[in-house]
Image (cartoon, rainbow, N blue to C red):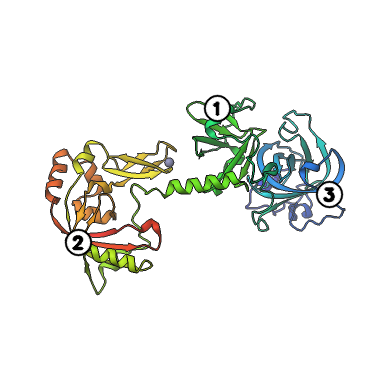
Amino acid sequence: MPASSIQSYFSSSSPTKSCPGDGFTSEELQAPSPTPEWMPVLDYEESDIASLEAGPRYLTIMGRIVNVYHTPKPSKQPKSAQGFFKLMVADDTGVMTVRLWYAKSLYALKLGQLVTLWTVHISQGDGQVGLAPNAAPIFTSIFPENERNCHFMIHERSDDGTLCRRPFGAKDNQVLPGLMTLRNFTDGGFDVDDFTNKNGNTSESVYVVVLDDTSEGFLTLYGSVSGSASAWIPYQTALLIANPGWRIDRSAKLSLNANTQLYIDPALAEARYLRALTQRLIKREHVNPNFPHDVFDAKEAEGAAIKILYKLSDIDEFVRTNPKEKAVGYMSIILTQLNIVVNYKREMLMSNECCGKPIFASKVVARCRQCDRECTLRINPRILGDVIDETGTISTGKLIFSDAAWEQLLGRTAEQLVSASLEVMKYLEQRLLFLRLTLGFGIHLGNEEIGRLVVWCVKM
Ligand SMILES: [Zn+2]
């Protein structure tokens, strides 16, 4: 048998090409089972997980994936399983282990997916992690491609996110038993088995920063489960982690082990509270918001037929009376103070935010201390003090300059600014102080994020 024939099932390019005499029937090649068209021929009984009992029975069970571990077991036998996924599946009543064997189908499994399985046997594990972990000793083992009465389905379109989202039968009026804050956890409130990271697991991993109202921690996802994090939204996705793997040094370092259950956006009062909390946290003003190029087009503003010069009081009145309208025009102002030298000395000429944390440096690129990613920094708006005209004041740091406007104001790019000498900084301050400037501005209150005045050009 040519060795390439098995490989062909794992590459999407030629899954249905058959070589004559490779040992497979054309039917086997054409029908990668399980297919969505699978129809149960037996009478299956729907069961919630808490009611499962060991023994043979035709059952259909629905739940969400709360843990998944891929164990490849390559076999040269074409009909043999090539491995299995060890899943933990939870509904509102309990959690079970599912050993899902596969030959040709590679299931695209992710944490949080709603799944239904049809099985003919339920087993009771003995608490040995091998078959089923302590946390979910009830298990079933299915091989849908070889067992016509077993089937596994991932609900992709039919999942409206309402089913199986109240783990452990949670009630809104009572705190989930055993639920603790990250701080309590870090301080020793945990009672779980030791987690040892298996050496040799060199597969990809994803590092997620998690926080609650008491502390911050890290969650690391290894291997096949790491892709699950891509759908999570920072400051929105709530995770309930039961029996996490952990390591405590300065903060909690959590991970998934065989007993861990990870519930994504569970329907719990605590999850809603956390989401509200993080929304309040990120409402805090960004230290250096990006110029909203999608709202204000500098080229279009520059080319406008009517150019209006506004007083600061006019702008204020305009946005109060027309909160939904967008205003674009010019203002003639004076810079009453400059903080270039002081920010140069503090190494804070540039700033941005990552992971919800401000980053200041006198560099164009700096690493986030939280996630270690490189972030592009922009000129710190606080190098300008109060900006005034005859009718009003804009306090320091409140104007959002585009990169082009900064360059026009300072006569140099951000790179040139951060590499300039102290003499140049002093000269810049002297040159700009009390100078009358015309700023091309825009304002739009429609979205709070851009409720601040933006500056798209500076004319000396
Ligand atoms: Zn970061």
Residue 391 tag number: 2
* Amino acid on which disc 1 is placed: Arg
* Amino acid on which disc 3 is placed: Asn
In front here: 447 or 344? 447
Ligand 1 within 8 Å, label 2 CB: no
Q: Single out the residue that lies furthest toward the bottom.
A: 305
Q: Quadrant of residue 408?
A: bottom left
Q: Single out the residue that lies furthest toward the front.
A: 173
The residue labelled by disc 3 is: 149
The crowding category of the residue bearing disc 2, from other C-alpha atoms within 10 Å (few below 14, some 14 to 19, many at least 20), is few
Helix, strand or loop status at disc 3? loop
Q: As displayed, is residue 7 above or below residue 293?
A: above
Q: Is residue 44 left or right of residue 297?
A: right
Q: Is residue 171 left or right of residue 450?
A: right
Q: Quadrant of ligand 1?
A: top left
* Amino acid on which disc 2 is placed: Thr
